[in-house]
Image (cartoon, rainbow, N blue to C red):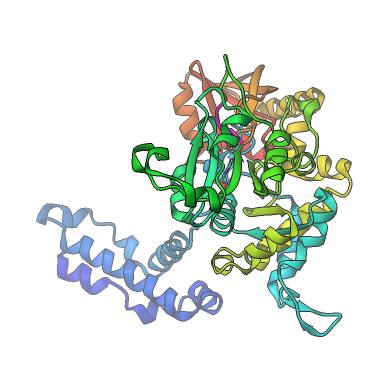
Amino acid sequence: MQKQELLRGLPKVDEVMRQESLVMLAEEKGELLVTEAVRDVIAAKRNEILDLLEETVELFDTDSISIGNIASAAEELLVQKEKKKLFPVINATGTILHTNIGRAPLGQDVMDNVVKASTGYSSLEYNVSAGKRGSRHDLVGELIKELTGAEDAMVVNNNAAATMLVLATLGKGKEVVVSRGELVEIGGSFRIPDIMKQSGAYLTEVGTSNKTKISDYENVILTKDDVAKLEWDDLDRGMERFETGALMKVHKSNYDIIGFTEETTIEELAELGEKKGIPVIFDMGNGLMLDMSEYGLNEPTIPASLKAGADVVLFSGDKLLGGPQAGIIVGKREYIKAMKKHPLARALRVDKMTFAALEATLLKYRDPKLALRDIPVLRMIASSEEVLRERAERLIEAIKKANKDAVCEIVEVEDQIGGGSAPLVRLPGLAVYVQDGNKSADRTERKLRKAEIPVIARINDDRLLLCVRTITDDEIDLIAEALR
Ligand SMILES: *Cc1c(COP(=O)(O)O)cnc(C)c1O
């Protein structure tokens, strides 16, 4: 057969489009994309034929250019093109707030509320009972006040945005005092000194890396009058000084300083702030609402931080709070009011989907028992050994059914909170160690990642581990399937 003959054998686009399967597909997805897929497949086949050598022309599979096969190839191509870049994965790493795979997972009922509030119109900025304009700030304001004891609250895009807004509102053109032990880098490009610069506030570092005392803060505080009286000799290398705008404490979210150390408590800072009339900001980061010391989390909670006297407390919605990505600012009415009015507020505001997820999450906290049961992050932290062991046993059973070569064993592991929340906490966990025939751990890990719903596993000492704390019971069969 000649190339010309093969080319003449290529079907016309119209012919292929008349195939029953494509007629139906075009109804669902529209004619445009289906026609384009058919055209692409035919063009690819044409190029394939043109590239044939004299001696390979005979080997060409003429069946592949039948109308039916071109139609199936077009369908397949369309499926490929519609594959999402953002899709679910299964977290078998044992790290609960894993930054790379989406931090806090949300529960089904929280997502149901998102769908309900965003599919049609909503009360986002409309006060339905009064029949007039409302404010999105009021949507969760009351609830946050009830749960935390704060005078007021506002929600922005994430805690980085919250930090920016707080500093721009309270610290612009002023000095904000931070301990040298708390000049945190969270990850990406979020570093306290950089965000401070962006906000227009001037960072004043006090203390040393390991020790900062309350007197260190007190010694650098300047009023407007103090600044006016400063002489050249008072200045460090001539550096200009400004009045003190705030004292700021930053949670050491992803490191700790141990040994010969001293840090200042919120109480001490609050007392000093009050004496001098300067607000105290606490960037707590993790957003822990409930006392979870029972599980080894010896971190201050939001209500405790406010009670200790912080004027403004800010935290993420999707760390230990277990909700959607958000930055929540709580504290004194006058400060929050100023933030709501700041020009940045609109640039940093959140969407109705976030409010819907946040409100549904926060409602759980009205009963701590419900929060521990229904908020996935808290449920994972609080999982008992009994629950973990039962899940591990069911996972082993499912894997053995799917893969006769797999040898499994329950092993003890240390799970982590992760996500810049409680850096030193290790939760005693369980994992299923899988030896898939004679495959290396790396190879099994790759196989798991290639599954329809990829499974992200942990490798320890060349052993492939599936940590059960971060998987749900519904995912057991999917993991087993991935190992088939
Ligand atoms: C995580 C964290 C941030 C950043 O919060 P995002 O919600 O990730 O923007 C800022 N400060 C502290 C102390 C944090 O722990």
Q: Nearer the viewer, residue 287 or 37?
A: 287
Q: In the image, is 129 to the left or to the right of 79?
A: right
Q: Is residue 58 above or below residue 132?
A: above
Left/right of residue 461 with respect to residue 363 in the rendered view: left
Q: Residue placed farthest to the left in the image? A: 54
Name of the residue lying farthest toward the bottom: 131
Residue occupying the point 50% across, 25% down: 209
Identify the residue shown where x is 48% and y is 62%. Answer: 79
Q: What x and y, as percent, mark residue 245?
A: 57, 51
- Ligand 1 rendered quadrant: top right
Query: Image check: 334 left or right of 59?
Result: right
Residue 240 in sight: yes
The quarter of the picture where residue 484 lies is: top right
How far across and down, in percent of the image, does residue 458 sit? 54, 27
The reply, left or right, for residue 266 in relation to residue 435 is: right
> Where does the magenta region start and end?
251-255
Query: How far across and down, in percent of the image, does residue 13 sit?
Result: 35, 78
Q: In the image, is residue 179 part of the stretch drawn in magenta?
A: no
State the residue in front, 276 or 381.
276
For the stretch drawn in magenta, the main secondary structure is loop
Locate the N terminus and report the quarter of the image it occupies: bottom left
**Residue 349: quarter of image:** bottom right
Q: Residue 273: x and y, percent? A: 67, 43
Quarter of the image where one finds residue 138: bottom right
User: How many labels sit on residues?
Assistant: 0
Residue 115's place in the image compared with 145, above or below, is below
Would you say residue 253 sits in the magenta stretch? yes
x 61%, y 27%: residue = 213
The answer to which of 73 and 470 lies nearer the viewer is 470
Residue 109 at least partly seen: no
Closer to us: 245 or 11: 245
